[in-house]
Amino acid sequence: MTMPDETAVRLSEEEGRTPPRGRDLAQLWVCGFLVLLGILAIIDASRLGGFSASNDPIGPKPVPIILGILLFVVAGCYALDVLRGGRGEAENGEDDGNFDWRTVGLLCAVFIANAVLIDWLGWVISGALLFWGAAIVLGSRRYLLTAVAAVVLSLATFYGFAIGLGVGLPAGVLQGIL
Amino acid sequence: MDNFNALMDGFAAILTPGNLLIALIGVTIGTAVGVLPGLGTAMAVALLLPITYGMEPTQAFIMFGGIFYGGMYGGSTTSILLNTPGQSSSVVTVLEGFKMAKAGRGGQALATAAIGSFVAGLIATTALVLVTPITVQFAITLGAPDYFAIMVLALVATSSVLGASRIRGFASLLVGLIIGTIGIDAVTGQQRLTYGVAELASGVDVIIVAVGVFAVGEALWTAARLKVAGDDVIPVGRVWMGRSDWKRSWGPWLRGSALGFPFGAVPAGGAELPTFLSYITERRLSKHKKEFGHGAIEGVAGPEAANNASAAGTMVPMLALGLPVNATAAVMLAAFQNYGIQPGPLLFEKESALVWTMIASLFVGNVMLLVLNLPLIPLWVKLLRIPKPYLYAGILFFASMGAYAVNAQPFDLFLLLTLGLVGLAMRRFGLPVLPLIVGLILGPMAERQARMALQLSGGDLGGLVGGPVSWTVYGIIALIALWPLVTLTRRRLARKREAEPVSV
């Protein structure tokens, strides 16, 4: 398990290149996203009125346009890199076929539920639901214990932060009770 | 001497029971969050920032100083005991630290990290006190073109110097810059990239981006790979250092601090490079070379000190120039802006008391950490045993709370989730997160400086190049941009000569 001198040095710059596996074509989605952002930026910038004031000769337009063009350039180079087998940081960019869409989807659903309910139910209830739901989705099977933890946590944060430290959290339907 | 007095006033301000309590709370929760696996210092600061919203700026920054050092310290515990660095700057600590823990010397590794962090923190914060006013003196002489050049340097350097892949760094940077342009243009009042969404008019809050990309992204990434990995926590044993441990640690501590601080203070020096350099240096100098790779204490002491010293170093450009060079500094800058305070050369004039109180709180927090952590390490280790479902449910819970607290609008929660999905994709595709955050913060600032420079020159593009400072900085940028060509040619030449692949 000794580590040759160069390995330690090289780790920093060539982390991504060491394991030579096949091309990771899913990375092309990133290029698509970058192009989309570039299009959005340029369309929006072209819509901006080109008025320039005496105190601002270039106006708000050039920056988004430059960024849009750069996005296209980077997307192009990125695509080339992907096709040549380039990868990102070794530890993160792993595609071992274990991407669990179901868990991610459920977690997003729980998260959205909190966003929708927070103003109506208030933080104590929606936050507790968020914690409980997320823990269950992530594999907790002790439903009751999780529920108790969720309620304790949301009550504690509400009293500690909202009432104690003045952080703005909604009381919702429990207004007047808490 | 003026600064010394100001610092003493800062100490006087912090040494009240109420403020000490706040510092204590900051240090404790900073450590607790920093210890949690997968959470780096930046994430700890971003997640905890909202709890300071109801406070006075002074109290908020006292707490912040505590969270900052606490988070730093907590991160090393995770690296040593779990083999999972919470951030790239702890990668090196893992090399020897985890081996030490496996060999039953986890207690010594944690102790040398804790005391090393304290020593480095002390040295680096003192250096901060001495260097920052000088930097401010220099910063006052800079004009808009110089600032623009320095900001471009920081942007280019964070995306290309750090990390494994330049192109991914730039991709991440551009996404951050685009997010930064969303909202009402400060000069003309026109809405950019809002596409009619009223909530976007005021721009996307940095805290929401940081929490979304770091915390929510991490939680989703864990969810996506739930079946893959389970980490084992290694028992610590007694936290204690023998005489030989002390003898072998103090040199690396000092050298690590000396390496770390300057790298942190330079735009885009970062903590990765000095930790690596410190590791290599200690390897060369050590009398126990054979132990390296099997858990050499020098390999923990040096990099941890370098890591901490560079973190303090990043405060110099952050305070003196308003220039964040790592994610933690970026989040702290956002915190300043939240209170309507703009870091930069004028900060020391306008908010002198606040800044010096904050610097004093760094000293106080550092001492508190040492006192707290050595005896409490076994307690922190217990935090590592929180089951994953609770841990990540808790992260989502606090992330939502913090994001909602920024503007009290549910829209931000949807934004948070969107950014979390961006963070998930970045983890999946190996894109570095730091350029995005730095781009988001520096982008609008750089645009403002550029437009100010062009305003002075009456729209002439030559106005973007000012005095010798901007020329020098553009020279450095060119050097960074051309560097891969240089290494490429060297590699090609070497390959020709030896007919076999040679690295670097």
Image: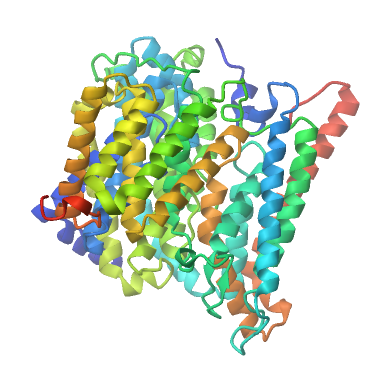
Out of B299 and A34, give the one closest to the viewer.
Answer: A34
Out of B236 and B8, give the one closest to the viewer.
Answer: B236
Whole-percent x, y for residue B139 in the image: 49, 69
Number of marks: 0
Whole-percent x, y for residue A9 in the image: 61, 28
Whole-percent x, y for residue B346 in the image: 40, 73
Report whether B424 appears left or right of B250: right
Please tell me which residue is depicted at 37% across the width and 30% down the height of the picture.
B76
Out of B310 and B426, give the one closest to the viewer.
Answer: B426
Whole-percent x, y for residue B454 in the image: 65, 80
Please tell me which residue is depicted at 27% across the width and 26% down the height of the picture.
B383
Q: Is residue B371 visible?
A: no
To which quarter of the image does residue B254 belong? top left
Report whether B455 appears left or right of B212: right
Please tell me which residue is depicted at 32% across the width and 48% down the height of the picture.
A117
Report whether B377 appears left or right of A11: left
Q: Relative to B337, does residue B276 appear above or below in the rendering?
A: above
Q: Relative to B234, does residue B377 appear above or below in the rendering?
A: below
To which quarter of the image does residue B94 belong? top left
Q: Is residue B324 visible?
A: yes
**Colour approach in the figure:** rainbow
Q: Quadrant of the N terminus of chain A?
A: top right
Please tell me which residue is depicted at 34% across the width and 10% down the height of the picture.
B104
Which residue sits furthest bottom? A54
